[in-house]
Amino acid sequence: MRKKLVLLALAALTAVLFTGCSRYVSSYRALALVRSATDSAASMTFSSLEGRMVFRLRSGPDKRLKYRASLKEGSAKVYLDQSGTKKELFVIGPGGTTEASAGPLRQGEIWLIVETASACREGDFQFEIVP
């Protein structure tokens, strides 16, 4: 009996330890989604996406965020959070394309949040931290 209680307590503790404490969480429905992320770059292409996709990158001082996006149908807002405040980076609508950069960035963790109002089709989003 005691052994079962110890195992149950260990299982509960393990579950708590492995849950992430992230500021933002991805929550989406997608079809044909290809997602890639490293410390300095992130990208996604999809046939269909609805919801929120979150990327966490790391920046050095005086770096810039270079981004490029295209979308065939639907609309999406992209936010940047580098200091605890989520700010709109750009909005893209149906048939839209955009390419620009933002910065300078602060050193440390930055969050990119892509949010769709409804289902988006044929999208391509690229983000890269550059000097």
Image: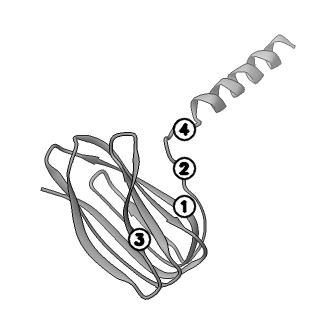
Query: Which residue is found at the position 61% from the left and 74% from the top?
Result: 118
Badge 2 crowding class, 10 Å Cα cut-off, few under 14, some 14 to 19, many 20 or more, is few
* Residue to which mark 2 is pinned: 25
* Residue to which mark 1 is pinned: 52
Three-letter code, disc 3: Val
Q: Mark 1 or mark 3, which is nearer to you?
A: 3
Rounded to the nearest whole Å, what is the CA distance between mark 1 and mark 2? 8 Å
Among the two numbered marks 2 and 3 on one chain, the one whose residue lies closer to the N terminus: 2
Rounded to the nearest whole Å, what is the CA distance between mark 2 and mark 3? 20 Å
Question: Which secondary structure, mark 4?
Answer: loop
* Residue to which mark 3 is pinned: 91
Among the two numbered marks 3 and 4 on one chain, the one whose residue lies closer to the N terminus: 4
Among the two numbered marks 1 and 3 on one chain, the one whose residue lies closer to the N terminus: 1
Is residue 2 rendered to the left or right of residue 61?
A: right
Q: Is residue 122 above or below residue 65?
A: below
* Residue to which mark 4 is pinned: 20
